Image (spheres, grey):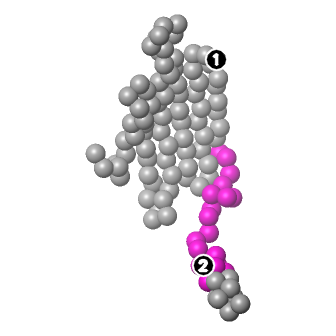
Amino acid sequence: MKSVLIVCFVLLVAAFASPLDDSKSAQILKYDSENIGIDGYRFEFETSDGTSRQEQAELRNAGTDTASIVVRGSYSYVGLDGTQYVINYVADENGFQPEGAHIPK
């Protein structure tokens, strides 16, 4: 019984010691979306906590055996250290290819 109380106490202390997560109270500042149909899509959003994302996709080689969707986009967020992180990416027949100043090459 004593060990259960110690575990509960440790969990309670950890819960109160953790930083507050502002993303749970973030407000949507901007949102735009366009579904182009089978040819692709695009969307973007921005929230009050510094998070944003934009993405667009297009169908390549429609009607052939090599038809594929190519997705391009970026997202950004403010890390726990206060730094704004930005990731640009392409996802195509070569896989997901992210790029960012903080991502090793």
Residue shown at 62%/62% (left/top)?
Answer: 22
Residue shown at 38%/28% (left/top)?
Answer: 94
Q: Is residue 90 visible?
A: no
Residue 63 or residue 102, whichever sits in front = 63
Q: Tell me which label, 2 or 1, sits earlier in the chain.
A: 2
Residue 87 or residue 7, whichever sits in front = 7
For the N terminus, the quadrant is bottom right
In the image, which residues are magenta? 10-29
For the C terminus, the quadrant is top left
33 on left or right of 94: right
- What residue would you read off at disc 2? 14
Residue at the far right: name it.
1
* Structural crowding at the residue carrying mark 2, measured as other residues with C-alpha within 10 Å and reported as few (<14), some (14–19) or many (≥20): few
Give the main secondary structure of the magenta stretch. Answer: helix
Residue 73 or residue 98, whichever sits in front = 98
Q: Which numbered tag is attached to residue 76?
A: none
- Residue type, numbered disc 1: Gly
Q: Secondary structure at mark 2?
A: helix
- What residue would you read off at disc 1? 37
Residue 32 screen position, x and y as percent: 64, 33
Q: Quadrant of residue 20?
A: bottom right
Residue 84 screen position, x and y as percent: 45, 54
- Distance of label 2 from label 1 (alpha carbons): 48 Å
Residue at the far top: name it.
63
Residue at the far bottom: name it.
2
Q: Quadrant of residue 83?
A: bottom left
Q: Is residue 31 visible?
A: yes
